[in-house]
Every structure is written in C-alpha cells, then in structure tokens.
Image (tube, rainbow, N blue to C red):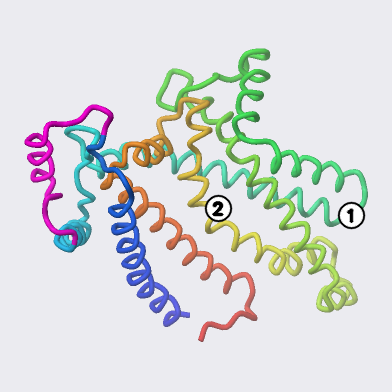
Amino acid sequence: MARFIIRRLLSIIPTMFVIVTLSFFLIRFAPGGPFSSEKKIPEAVLQNILKKYHMDEPLHKQYGRYLADILRGDLGPSYRYSDQTVNELIGATMPTSIILGSFALALAFLLGTLAGITSALRQNKWPDYLSMSIAVIGISVPLFVIGPVLQLVFAMKLSWLPTSGWINSRAGWKTLILPMITLAFPYFAYIARLSRGSILEVLRSDYIRTARAKGLKESVVILKHVLKGALLPVVSYLGPAFSGIITGSVVVETVFLVPGVGQIFVQSALNRDYTLIMGDIIVYSAILVAMNFVVDIVYGLLDPRIAYK
C-alpha cells in the first residue's frame, strides 16, 4: 500500500505538467486576447501593455517564465482585474465555494445513499418509486429552476430562510441551507441511482447468501457486507463530483448571491484573462487529481480484494 501511495503521488507531477502545458498553448492559440476589445487601443499603448506582462516575448519564453512562476506558487497577475493577482482572486473566493460544495456533497452522499438503500431493500414498492421519482426530478430539473422555487417557498412564502447572502452576513448559517440543498439535488439523484443499482447487484451475490445462511442479522449483513462492496461505484463518482460541485456552482452562486469562485471562472473565460484562466484550470485539475488519489486509497479500504501491485 505504501509503495502504491508513493507511486500515485509521483504520478501527479507529470499529470499536472501535461495539463498546464496543453492548457497554456491552447489558450494562447485561441483567437482574441485579454486586451482585445471593441474600442481599438493605440498601438503604442498596446505595445507597452504587452511589454509590461512579457507578452511581447516569444511563446516558448513566456511558457518557461510561467512554469518558473508556478513552481514558486505564483499564478501571476490578472490582466483584467487591475492591481489584483490570480492568487488573491482565487484565494478570496475559493474558501466560500469549498464550504458550500463540501456541505452540499456531504448532504447528497448521506441522503442519496439512504435513498439507494431504501429503494434496493424495498424494490418495486412505494419507497422505491418515491425515491427514484425524486431522483429523476433532481436529474431532469435544472438548478436555475430549483433554486428560485426554493426561494419562493421557504424564503418568500414561509419566511423561514433568507433569499440570498452568505454566512458572514446578519442571517449567519441560515444562508447556507438553500444553496446547499439546491446544489446537492442533482448529486443526490445520481448517488441514489448508483447506490440502488449497486446494492441490488451485491444483494444477489453468493457471499451475501452465505452470510444470511450463517444466521447473521439483516442489519449486520447490510452494514458490514453489502455496503462495503456496493459503495465502490459511489466512491469512484465522488472524486470528480467534488471538483465539479466546487467549480461548477456558478448558477447557484448567482441565484443566491454567494461570493464563490464560480463567477470568477466564467468571467475569466469571457475576458480571455489568460493567467486567471490558467489559475482556474490548475486549481480545478489539482482538486480533481487529489480527489481521484483519495478515491484510489478508499477503494482498498472498502474492498480488500483490490490488490495494489
């Protein structure tokens, strides 16, 4: 196990190198640029701006300079947000998105797993139909519909929760509830369907029949034998889901006025802010690679049949 962990950690280095290299050149080869606008900038002014950011140098020199900056932990200045660096922009918004995404994914995992277990154990009965119907709604209804509906019901009609804001506002942690539920809805749906199908498959396995034949309690069979094997597809889904739920929450952050990183991600692409786009890609990729690494480790803990060679 230790050797596997070391190898996986070392494999992260070339993976991130390839991601950074491809992203750098693809962005630079795309039409337009951070200083392209409808109003034409005088040529002398444009040349001064390019020189300030070293964009007048050959592309390979820009690439080498950028790699050196990354190794020092410097993601560079933002081309469109004056007097702010990419580190500052991402550092100011990422904690908010991580808090919202972590709570949303934890809620989705807990409720989705419970719904999947209930559906599998009560297959073709009303709990199964009810859980899967809610899951279908979560998959098919977009977040920009779910969010306003929850605001209408729980904030405007019942006045139980605030319509928007964040935990540092007067309403405090109540502001987290509605965006958390909204963001968790589609992930709950996928986890519920995944866990249901996986549990049904495991329940038909020979070792489950053997465990029941030994006279073990049904609760012991479910908790100690069924869930360990059935949760493997769910665990593999949680890796990309965690990175996606953090960086893909722009709709929820817009609806509930959450000051997260989603707005920065979208705006950087619209502005063609090269360094901010690269910073977003590096952060997103690092989260995805790190979560896949964690998933690989958890796999071995859940299923001892998996051997790390």
Closest to the observer, 216 or 175:
175
Q: Is residue 29 above or below residue 176?
A: below
Q: Disc 1 or disc 2, which is closer to the eye?
A: 2
Q: Is residue 234 magenta?
A: no
Q: Amino acid at mark 1?
A: Gln
Classify mark 2: helix, strand or loop.
Answer: helix
Packing grade of label 1 (10 A; few <14, some 14-19, many >=20) is: some
Q: Is residue 19 left or right of residue 159?
A: left
Quarter where residue 17 is shown: bottom left
**CA distance separating discs 1 and 2:** 27 Å
Residue at image point 14% right, 61% down: 61
Q: Is residue 236 left or right of residue 55?
A: right
Residue at image point 68% right, 52% down: 191
Q: Which residue is mark 1?
A: 123
Q: Is residue 122 left or right of residue 28?
A: right
Q: Which residue is mark 2?
A: 241
Residue 214, given in percent of the width and then of the height, sits at 87, 77
Residue at image point 40% right, 79% down: 7
Residue 64 - label: none
Residue at image point 83% right, 51% down: 119
Closest to the observer, 74 or 23:
23
Residue lying farthest to the right in this orientation: 125
Quarter where residue 130 is shown: top right
* Residue range corresponding to the magenta coloring: 37-59
Residue lying farthest to the bottom in this orientation: 309
Residue 55, given in percent of the width and then of the height, sits at 15, 49
Q: Amino acid at mark 2?
A: Ala
Q: Please tell me how many numbered marks the rendered image carries.
A: 2
